[in-house]
Image (cartoon, helix red, strand yellow):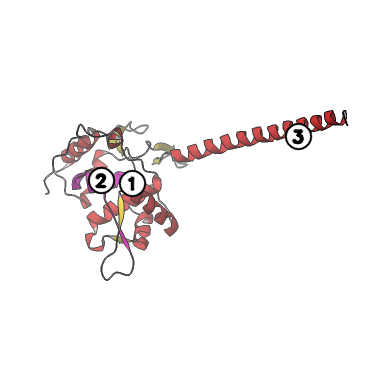
Amino acid sequence: MEDHEQQTAPSENDTPEDNQVVALNFEESRVLGSLIEKELTTPEYYPLTLNSLVSACNQKNNRLPKSNLDESEVSKTIEDLRLKRLVYRVDLVGSRVPKFQHNAEKELDLIKAELALIAELLNRGPQTSGELNSRASRMFEFDGLEDVEDTLEDMMDRTPSFVGIMDPRPGQKEKRWFHKFGPPPTLENLDDGSSVYVPAPDQRLDKVEEIIGEFKDLKEEVEALRYQLRELSDEYRNFRKQFE
C-alpha cells in the first residue's frame, strides 16, 4: 500500500483567496471526478480525449445522478476548469486529437488516497464511510474502514475543509460524507418511497435571475421616465405657443 504523505500546512503568507475552497458546479464536479477516476482505474487510457471524457461523464455505473452531457457542454466545462487550474490540455506526439488530464493532485494538494475519495464524492454524491471504503478501493488500496475515516477526517480538518458530514437520512443511523466544492446536496424523495441526494442548484443561476429581475425593474423605470419626458415636452411646446 502506498504511504500517506504529510499534508503541507498553509503558510503565513497565504492570502484569503488561498484559504477558500474552489467552487465547482455540477458539470465541473462531474468532469473533474471522471478524470480523477479514469487516471486511477485505467491509467493506460489516460489522459482522455474529449470523446472519452464525455463517455466517462455519462457512464451508467458509479455516477449519481446520471448525466447526459454533450461535447459542447464538456468542452465549455473543460475551459472553466482550465481557468481554475484544475484541468489542462495535453498534445501527445503522434496523437491527432488533444487529450485532457486533471491537476487536482497539485492544485488542491491531494495525495492518492484523498484523490480516490474525492473522486467518489464528486461522481456519486454523499456516501457513508462504508460505501466509500467499498467503492474507492478500486482506485486506492485502503487499510480498511478506519484508514478511510482517518483520511476523510484529515480532509475535513484542513483549511479550507474539503469534506463535511451530513445528517442521516430519515429512518437511518449512518451519516454521510460530502465534498465542499459546492453547496451541500439536498435530499429528494422519490415516488417509490426511497430518497436520493441531488446536487444543490448552481448559485450562479440565482445570481442570473437576480440580475434579470433588476434589469426588468430598470427597464420599467426607464419607460416611466420616457413617458414623463414626453409629457414635459408636450407641456413645454404648449407653453411656447402661448408666446408665438
Front disc: 1 or 3: 3
- Furthest toward the front, the residue is 244
Q: CA distance from mark 2 to mark 1?
A: 9 Å
Q: Is residue 90 left or right of residue 216?
A: left
User: Residue under circle 3?
Assistant: 230
* Mark 2 and mark 1 residues within 8 Å of each other at the beta carbon: yes
Which is in the foreground here, disc 2 or disc 3? Answer: 3
Residue placed most toward the observer, 79 or 230: 230
Q: Nearer the viewer, residue 221 or 94?
A: 221
Closer to us: 184 or 191: 184
| Left or right of 124, for residue 159 | left
> N-terminal of the two: label 2 or label 3?
2
Q: Mark 1 sits on what residue?
A: 84
Residue at horizontal 65 percent and vertical 32 percent from the top:
221
Asked if residue 85 shows in the view, the reply is: yes
Q: Which residue is mark 2?
A: 107
Quarter holding residue 69: bottom left
Residue segment shown in magenta:
98-125
| Earlier residue among tags 2 and 1 | 1
Percent coordinates x, y for residue 186 in the rendering: 41, 36
- SS for dot 2: helix
Residue 124 counted in the magenta span: yes
